[in-house]
Image (tube, rainbow, N blue to C red):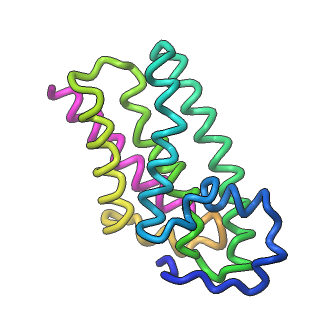
Amino acid sequence: MKSRIPQPITDEKFPLLPKMIATSFGAGFLPVAPGTWGALVAILLWLPFYIWTPGLTAFVATAIGIVFFTVAGTWASSESEKYWGKDPVVACVDETVGQLISLLPLCGGATVAPWWTIAVSLALFRFFDIFKPLGIRSLEKLPGGLGMMADDILAAIYSALLLTGLIWLL
């Protein structure tokens, strides 16, 4: 479980690159609900691809973003624990990755109400991320950045599956 208040041990020595990645470009420093802000960063990064590119291009760009932020985020999250303690709340790149995964079902562009489905994607992901049902919580026990990222990835997979079902039903 994320600590509510970051405990900077030597924050002034925390290198800028891993700090910016771990906090989703600083979104984690916003005062209320940093995880939700991290998820909103994903939507902001994803929207231009969704709006201005064909569905396959949006899907590939999203997949590349997921891989990049998962690898970089795992490293940066591990680094953040050295400065802020175990699973600090300001390290929200895991939510950014999770939200990107939750948005994958929308990349085909064939949804009935795209803005509504983006909001549902966010709500589903945050639900699974906060309440951690169906084995999600157990992944937090993995060491360092891997544990920080893995639970959000599973939450996002559940969200994407449910969203896919909703889109199919509509």
Residue at 74% x, 87% y is 9
Furthest-top residue in this view: 54
Residue 150 lies in magenta, yes or no? yes
Q: Position of residue 119 (x, y in %)?
A: 29, 42
Count up the numbered dots: 0
Q: Which residues are magenta?
A: 149-170
Q: Nearer the viewer, residue 18 or 147?
A: 18
* Quadrant position of residue 110: top left
Residue at 53% x, 83% y is 5
Residue 146 lies in magenta, yes or no? no
Furthest-left residue in this view: 170
* Quadrant position of residue 107: top left
* Quadrant the C terminus occupies: top left
Q: Position of residue 77 (x, y in %)?
A: 67, 65
Residue at 71% x, 68% y is 78
Q: Is residue 2 above or below residue 43?
A: below
125 sits to left or right of 162: right
Q: Position of residue 13 (x, y in %)?
A: 84, 75
Q: Is residue 121 above or below residue 109?
A: below
Q: Position of residue 64 (x, y in %)?
A: 63, 33
Residue at 51% x, 15% y is 53
Q: Is residue 41 above or below residue 116?
A: below
Q: Is residue 50 above or below residue 43?
A: above
* Quadrant position of residue 88: bottom right
| Helix, strand or loop for the magenta stretch, by majority | helix
